[in-house]
Each structure stands twice: as C-alpha cells, then as structure tokens.
C-alpha cells in the first residue's frame, strides 16, 4: 500500500506507518499543497492522510478512484464528501479523541479573554495607550455562578462544561439532537430546547459538528434570542455562525461579547471588524495546537491506516 501524508505532521505517525512496512510519501513543507498538487500526488497512492483545509469533494474523489481510505488528521470531516466516498467504496476515518482537552482549554481561555477584554487591552499597551487609572473604563464581567449553555454536549462540550462548573460553579444547560445522560451526571447538565438554551444562558458555547442542519445556525434570529449580556463562543467550525450577523449583533449590543477560534470564512481577513472590537477575542483556529494533541492526532491517523491494512476494524471509521 502506498500512503500519501499530505501535510507536515508529527513524526510519531510517520514512524508507525513505516514500521508497518508501508510505502509512505510525506509532504514536508509547512505550507499546504495546492488543490492541483494534492490531486496529482493522490493519484499515485492508495491511501490519503489528509486534513480539514483540503477539499475532498466529488470531483476530487472521481479523479482518484484508486483510493481505498482517507484518514483525516482532525475530528471534523466536513471537508470530505463522505457520501460520495462511501458510494465509491472509499473508507473515511478521523481522530475524535485526540484534542478534547486542548480544545476545551481554548474555549475556556477565550471565555476568560472576552470577559475581561484581554485582547483589546493588550493592544492598548502596544499602541502606547495604557493611560491613567479610569474607574469606569473598559470594565469586564465576572463569571462566578453564571449559566453556560452548551450546543453540542459531546466529549469537548462536556470537558468545557466541567471547567465552567469546577472553576466558577456555573449552572450547565445543553442542547443536542438526543440527550447525553452520561454527561448530565458527569457535569450536572440539564437538557433544554434550543430556544430555551438561547434565552436562559449567560454564555452560549458551540461544540457541535458542521452539518447542513447546523450551518449558520447562529444568525440574526438566534442572536436576537440571546440575553443582551450574553457571550457567544465558537471553537467548533466557523460555518456554524453567520459572521455578518455576529458583527451586527455585537455592534448593536444585541449580545455582549464573543470568543472565536473559528471564523466564517477562514482565514479571517486582517481588517475584519471583529478584530478591533472591545468585547471580542479571536484566535486563528488553534484549538488542537498542543504538543500532546497534535502527537495524538498523528498517532490515531496512522493507527486508522494500519488497522485498515491489517484487515482489522478501524477504531475511528466515519459512517
């Protein structure tokens, strides 16, 4: 089997593949391949180890009918036309457990940054605008005892809720397609309707997958249902919120603040209005950017391939 690793991942996964006796080609440049480079290189391989910035669409798959497996170096796989792949007999796998703690940490860090306007105030220092003490200027919010609403109480959502409850004694609400009884017990979460989540939460944090049902789920209507004092967090996928509607909601004080590790679109332009807003904190999609998480992503992406080549059931097959 010939494996194309289409990005510069940690060595642990590469070593696993080569130890297994697989023929491995690695793209070692930190810049991603162009679409045409990826298309051409993939045609020479049986297995593709890919990542979410690459668009594995219907046309790409049709031109790579020799593929047997796509192992995604990520949890999300909305960049892959899984339905088309399945129709063609191409399996898809991902790395769902690797970045739970890292992403929950980023969500919690953004919450703190928004609530105390840290990014905005840091820029004040850089601009030589520290200034004199002003008792009522740039005041933030305290988090103790607030209500956090989790949209998508899976592994990452549960880990984030545990931080909120443990650090600040927050009340935890959530909305999923179906109830998560285990998580309810673990973090004392209460299941509510989506509309109730919006109305009751002081903080609304997104941890769901990007699907046709969740695409731009957070928009003018839904922001309008939230408290004027509320904070919106998205560390899942940028496509889950409508960015123009979010900008307007913040400008018009429909909601109080926002923390984003994902934007719509990505990458965000340097002059996006969100970057200059006082109550906003944006990071460049670094939820999984820890040594531990990226190494585990590499290991799991390689494990998917090894299990497939051995004829074993893949632990993380997408179905």
Image: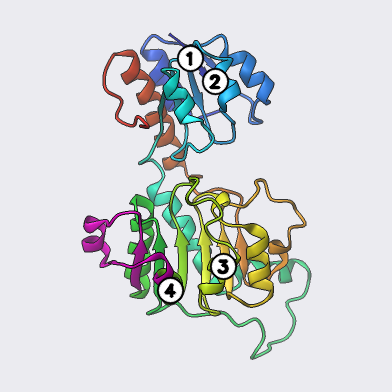
Q: Distance between the residues labelled 1 and 4?
A: 46 Å
In this view, the mark in front (4 or 3): 3
Judged from the image, the secondary structure of the residue bearing numbered disc 2 is: helix
Residue 210 left/right relative to 249: left
Mark 4 and 2 residues: CB-CB less than 8 Å, in contact?
Answer: no
State which quarter of the image contains the N terminus: top left
Instruction: In the rendered structure, find residue 221 and report the number of the disc placed on it.
Output: 3
Q: In this view, does 42 lie to the left or right of 96?
A: right
- Tell me residue 296's x, y (percent): 39, 36
* Circle number at residue 201: 4
Residue designated by label 1? 67
**If you read the primary sequence from the N terminus, does the residue marked by circle 4 or circle 2 appear first?**
2
Q: Earlier in the sequence, mark 1 or mark 4?
A: 1
Q: Gap between marks 4 and 2, in whole Å?
A: 42 Å
Q: Do the residues labelled 4 and 3 touch (CB within 8 Å)?
A: no
Q: What's the distance in space between the residues labelled 1 and 2, CA to CA?
A: 8 Å
**Of the residues under marks 1 and 3, which one precedes in the sequence?**
1
Of badges 2 and 3, nearer the viewer stands: 3
Q: Are marks 1 and 2 in contact (CB under 8 Å)?
A: yes
Residue extent of the magenta highlight: 171-196
Which residue corresponds to the image point at 56% horizontal and 73% vertical from the top-left?
Answer: 224
Q: Which residue is rendered at x = 57% and y = 48% of the image?
A: 285
Residue at numbered disc 2? 61
Q: Which of 45 and 122 is in front in this view?
A: 45
């Amino acid at each position: 089997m010939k494996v194309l690793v289409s990005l510069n991942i940690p060595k642990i996964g590469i070593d696993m593949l080569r130890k297994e006796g697989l023929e491995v080609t690695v793209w070692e440049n930190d810049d991603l391949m162009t679409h045409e480079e990826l298309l051409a290189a993939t045609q020479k391989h049986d297995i593709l180890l890919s990542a979410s910035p690459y668009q594995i669409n219907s046309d790409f798959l049709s031109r790579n009918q020799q593929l047997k497996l796509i192992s995604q170096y990520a949890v999300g796989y909305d960049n892959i036309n899984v339905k088309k792949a399945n129709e063609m007999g191409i399996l898809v796998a991902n790395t769902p457990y690797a970045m739970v703690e890292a992403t929950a940490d980023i969500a919690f860090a953004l919450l703190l940054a928004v609530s105390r306007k840290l990014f905005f105030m840091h820029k004040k220092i850089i601009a030589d605008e520290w200034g004199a003490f002003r008792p009522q200027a740039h005041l933030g919010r305290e988090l103790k005892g607030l209500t956090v609403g989790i949209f998508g109480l899976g592994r990452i959502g549960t880990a984030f809720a545990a931080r909120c409850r443990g650090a600040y004694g927050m009340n935890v609400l959530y909305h999923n397609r179906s109830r998560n009884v285990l998580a309810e017990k673990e973090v004392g979460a209460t299941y509510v309707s989506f509309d109730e989540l919006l109305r009751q939460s002081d903080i609304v944090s997104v941890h769901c997958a990007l699907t046709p049902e969740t695409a731009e789920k957070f928009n003018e209507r839904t922001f309008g249902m939230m408290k004027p004092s509320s904070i919106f967090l998205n560390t899942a996928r940028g496509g889950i919120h409508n960015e123009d509607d979010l900008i307007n909601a913040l400008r018009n004080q429909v909601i109080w603040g926002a923390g984003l590790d994902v934007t719509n679109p990505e990458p965000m332009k340097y002059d996006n209005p969100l970057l200059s807003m006082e109550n906003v904190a944006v990071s460049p999609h670094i939820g999984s950017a820890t040594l531990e998480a990226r190494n585990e992503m590499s290991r799991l992406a390689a494990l998917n391939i090894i299990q497939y080549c051995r004829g074993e059931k893949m632990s993380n097959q997408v179905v």
